[in-house]
Amino acid sequence: MKTESVTLTKQELADAITSPVSVFDFPLEVVACPGLSWDQKIEILKRWELDARALQRATDENMGGEEPNLLDEVNRALMMLDPENSVHDGFGSAPTKV
């Protein structure tokens, strides 16, 4: 984890919600972070999923950057937190091109 603290500061939490990769190196770090509530973990992972899907679309259109796409890891982390509901608000569905 990029932050050394177990409990995130308000700024780190805000950063994690808007850009998870700015605070966490891997999605499973979100799951393991004891300083976050279940709802906060889901919110951060949903954001990460949206970012990963956007990166996947860009890569599919030959516009990808150099960041690794962690979509599978994000989906695994979401399933670990909520195995009964592997499709979170439609985010778990197949990506569509717009």
Image (cartoon, rainbow, N blue to C red):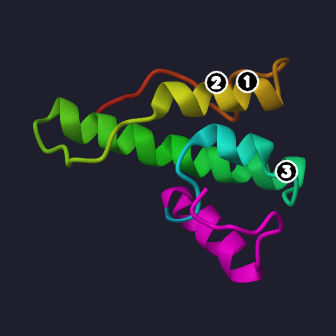
Q: Where is mark 3, residue-wise? A: 39
What is the spatial separation of the Cα atoms under label 3 and label 2, in whole angstroms? 16 Å
The crowding category of the residue bearing disc 2, from other C-alpha atoms within 10 Å (few below 14, some 14 to 19, many at least 20), is: some
Q: CA distance from mark 1 to mark 3?
A: 14 Å
Q: CA distance from mark 1 to mark 2?
A: 5 Å
The magenta segment:
1-21
Q: Quadrant of residue 14?
A: bottom right
Name the residue nearer the viewer: 6 or 55: 6
Considering only vertical position in the picture, is 76 above or below 1? above
Residue 51 in the image, given as x and y percentages of width and height: 44, 48
Give the farthest residue toward the front.
Answer: 4
What amino acid is found at the position of numbered circle 3 in the picture?
Answer: Asp
Whether residue 17 appears in magenta in the rendering, the answer is yes
Residue highlighted by disc 2:
76
- Picture coordinates of residue 59, whole percent (x, y): 20, 36
Point 87% across, 53% down: residue: 34
Relative to residue 96, is residue 37 depicted above or below? below
Of residues 51 and 25, the one nearer the viewer is 25
Q: Are marks 1 and 2 in contact (CB under 8 Å)?
A: yes
Q: Quadrant of the N terminus?
A: bottom right
Provide residue 5's location: percent of width, then percent of height: 76, 69
Horizontal arrangement in the rendering, residue 51 relative to residue 8 (left or right): left
In magenta segment, residue 9: yes
Badge 1 vs badge 3, beta-carbon distance below 8 Å? no
- Residue of label 1: 79
Q: Amino acid at mark 1?
A: Met
Label 2 is placed on what type of residue?
Arg
